[in-house]
Image: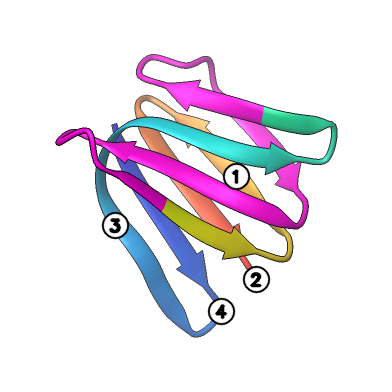
Amino acid sequence: MNVKIIKPDATLYEGEAKLVQLPGIDGLFEILNNHAPIISALQKGKIRIVDNNDQTLYFDIIAGVVKSEKNSVLLLVQ
């Protein structure tokens, strides 16, 4: 799936991934391929991405929003 993480002043990540783990306001949750459409608020924590080469990447955020549909994940974060 295509993942894009955007801050107000820069793009943190753009690429393909197998898994995205997010710090939702009610706890951690994951988005995998063919996930149902979702829009959710995010709280302070770490975004974990497992890319198609099985490498794990981490991004610290203060807050944000995620929108996912049709194997495309867009994160707007601080």
Task: Report the amino acid beneath label 2.
Answer: Gln
Whole-number angstrom distance, CA of label 2 to CA of label 1: 12 Å
Q: Residues within 10 Å of mark 4 (few under 14, many from 20)?
A: few
Residue 59 on image: x %, y %: 50, 59
Q: Residues within 10 Å of mark 2 (few under 14, many from 20)?
A: some
Q: Which mark is residue 8?
A: 4
Which is nearer the N-term, disc 1 or disc 3?
3
Q: Which is more foreground, mark 4 or mark 2? A: 2
Q: Residue at x 66, y 35 (%)?
A: 39
Residue 45 in magenta?
Answer: yes
Residue of label 2: 78
Residue of label 1: 66
Residue reaching furthest to the right = 26
Q: For the residues labelled 1 and 3, say whether their Cβ atoms are less than 8 Å apart.
A: no
Task: Report the amino acid beneath label 3.
Answer: Glu
Whole-number angstrom distance, CA of label 2 to CA of label 3: 16 Å
The magenta region covers: 29-57
